[in-house]
Image (spheres, grey):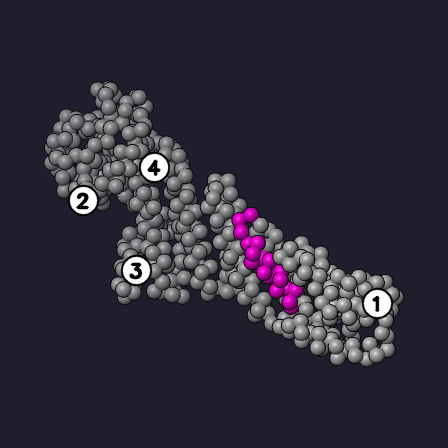
């Protein structure tokens, strides 16, 4: 139950990212490919079974695939780097030059290192117990990949410069 | 508790003088029939005796009526939660008590009432399920009301209430679990039942643990039941609400842990709650404690 609720929240966030971020026109056709880089098979399976049955706002089928090498990232609209693979970031970034692939990570400090969005757990205001899943965004990285993020997401996320 | 034979012996002593005087009246016949285990005829004569003016104020006659109706209950209505014979028996015994200024019959009355009370308890226990729980509650509180008049020990009442509320909470939880969307009221009823236990016994491990589990499961259900495609604002709200519920479960589970730090289910519960609060280090700490306990148990 615990892991499943984590996967559910994360996949729902990803689904909302797809909804509230605009990719350039050439990314609005064909499948919307989400590449997952990391070894969490349960998370991968959850994403696959819950996201592949849905479509993007541009009516694209969502495809979830596992990325085993940095070069595979180039064919994706969104790359999700799991915490156990965060050291792959420089290599993935190097393969995404000139692309509009949104990079999402889930490790502290990754937003500063140039990912567009980064899952973090934040303490709730007025309480020293209980953290909420949220996300950081790096506007420079988002601009670099020519993505447009909606105000809705900016309101909820935490900006990292 | 006195059994029937003892009651008859006591009663015989009390009545000896009376029989010497009046051999053939309705009261005497009722007495003879009940001692001969012919409750139907005894009932006929005691009902007749009750029409006599003098009987109305005689605690002995009311006692005999209570005894005979108790026998009628035993014979014809045992296990019937609505038994009229049992009600009449109790009313008669109460009337006898009220008239008995010298307390001559109080021991016998108390014994019979205690026995009748125990039948309400048996009914409450056998009817406590997801269908007949309301009748069970009625029987239980009938039992408690009678017990309060015959057993002055508040401790026994408390113990009975705790046992019953724990069982009732389990039934309410079963009903809620069968249809979480539409039977949310039963979740609150289960919480109320555990709260009643905790009011009587704040150190009750079972109530603390189960209350923690109720809140935990409520939060988990909130997450599981949410529509996958909800908007990010609603998603944020669901997280807030589930965290609130996970936090509410924590003090109960912590209390259960304080009362028994080596109980595996509690350690598992605490690890789960902290994990759900995204407090991963604390979750790991209780996971380690659980593994230690499990190693020691091997």
CA gap, disc 2 to disc 3? 26 Å
Q: Chain of mark 1?
A: B
| Secondary structure beneath label 3 | helix
Instruction: Give the magenta part as a residue range.
Output: B114-131
The answer to whether one can see residue B281 in this image is yes
Q: Which residue is mark 4?
A: A156
Q: How many numbered discs?
A: 4
Determine whether, in the image, residue A4 is placed left or right of residue B100: left
Q: Position of residue A157 (x, y in %)?
A: 31, 37
Q: Is the residue B7 above or below the residue B228 in the image?
A: below
| Secondary structure beneath label 4 | helix
Q: Which residue is mark 2?
A: A84
Question: Label 4: few (<14), some or many (≥20) within 10 Å?
Answer: some
* Residue found 62% across the figure and 73% down from its top: B1
Q: Is the residue B272 above or below the residue A67 in the image?
A: below
Q: Which residue is mark 3?
A: B290
From the image, state whether disc 3 or disc 1 is nearer to you. Answer: 1
Determine whether, in the image, residue B253 is placed left or right of residue B297: right
* Residue found 53% across the figure and 55% down from its top: B168
* Residue found 56% across the figure and 64% down from its top: B160
Compare residues B294 and B187 and report the one nearer the observer.
B294
């Amino acid at each position: 139950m615990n892991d499943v609720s984590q996967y559910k929240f994360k996949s729902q966030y990803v689904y909302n990212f797809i909804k509230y971020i605009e990719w350039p026109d050439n990314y609005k056709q064909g499948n919307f490919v989400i590449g997952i880089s990391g070894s969490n098979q349960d998370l991968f399976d959850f994403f696959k079974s819950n996201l592949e049955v849905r479509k993007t706002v541009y009516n694209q089928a969502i495809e979830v695939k596992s990325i085993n090498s940095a070069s595979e990232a180039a064919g994706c609209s969104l790359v999700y780097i799991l915490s156990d693979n965060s050291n792959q970031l420089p290599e993935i970034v190097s393969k995404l030059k000139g692309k509009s692939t949104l990079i999402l990570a889930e490790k502290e400090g990754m937003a500063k290192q140039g990912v567009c969005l980064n899952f973090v757990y934040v303490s709730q205001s007025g309480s020293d117990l209980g953290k909420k899943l949220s996300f950081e965004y790096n506007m420079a990285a988002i601009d670099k990949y020519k993505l447009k993020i909606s105000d809705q997401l900016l309101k909820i996320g935490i900006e990292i410069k | 508790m006195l059994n029937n034979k003892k009651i008859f012996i006591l009663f015989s002593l009390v009545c000896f003088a009376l029989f010497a005087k009046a051999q053939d009246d309705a009261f005497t016949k009722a007495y003879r029939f009940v001692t001969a285990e012919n409750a139907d005829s005894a009932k006929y004569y005691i009902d007749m005796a009750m029409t006599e003016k003098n009987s109305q104020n005689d605690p002995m006659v009311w006692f005999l009526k209570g005894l005979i109706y108790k026998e009628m209950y035993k014979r014809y209505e045992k296990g019937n939660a609505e038994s009229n014979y049992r009600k009449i028996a109790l009313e008669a015994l109460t009337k006898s008590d009220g008239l008995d200024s010298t307390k001559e019959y109080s021991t016998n009355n108390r014994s019979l009432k205690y026995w009748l009370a125990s039948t309400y308890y048996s009914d409450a226990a056998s009817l406590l399920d997801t269908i007949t729980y309301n009748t069970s509650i009625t029987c239980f509180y009938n039992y408690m009301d009678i017990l309060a008049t015959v057993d002055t020990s508040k401790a026994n009442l408390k113990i009975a209430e705790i046992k019953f509320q724990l069982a009732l909470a389990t039934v309410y939880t079963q009903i809620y679990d069968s249809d979480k969307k539409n039977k949310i009221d039963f979740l609150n009823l289960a919480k109320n039942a555990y709260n009643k236990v905790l009011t009587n016994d704040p150190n009750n491990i079972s109530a603390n643990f189960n209350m923690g589990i109720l809140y935990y499961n409520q939060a988990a259900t909130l997450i599981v039941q949410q529509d996958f495609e909800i908007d990010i604002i609603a998603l944020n709200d669901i997280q807030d609400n589930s965290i609130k519920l996970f936090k509410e479960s924590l003090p109960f589970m912590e209390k259960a842990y304080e009362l028994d730090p080596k109980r595996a289910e509690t350690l598992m519960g605490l690890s789960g709650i902290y994990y759900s609060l995204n407090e991963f280090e604390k979750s790991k700490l209780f996971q380690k404690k659980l593994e230690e306990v499990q190693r020691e148990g091997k």
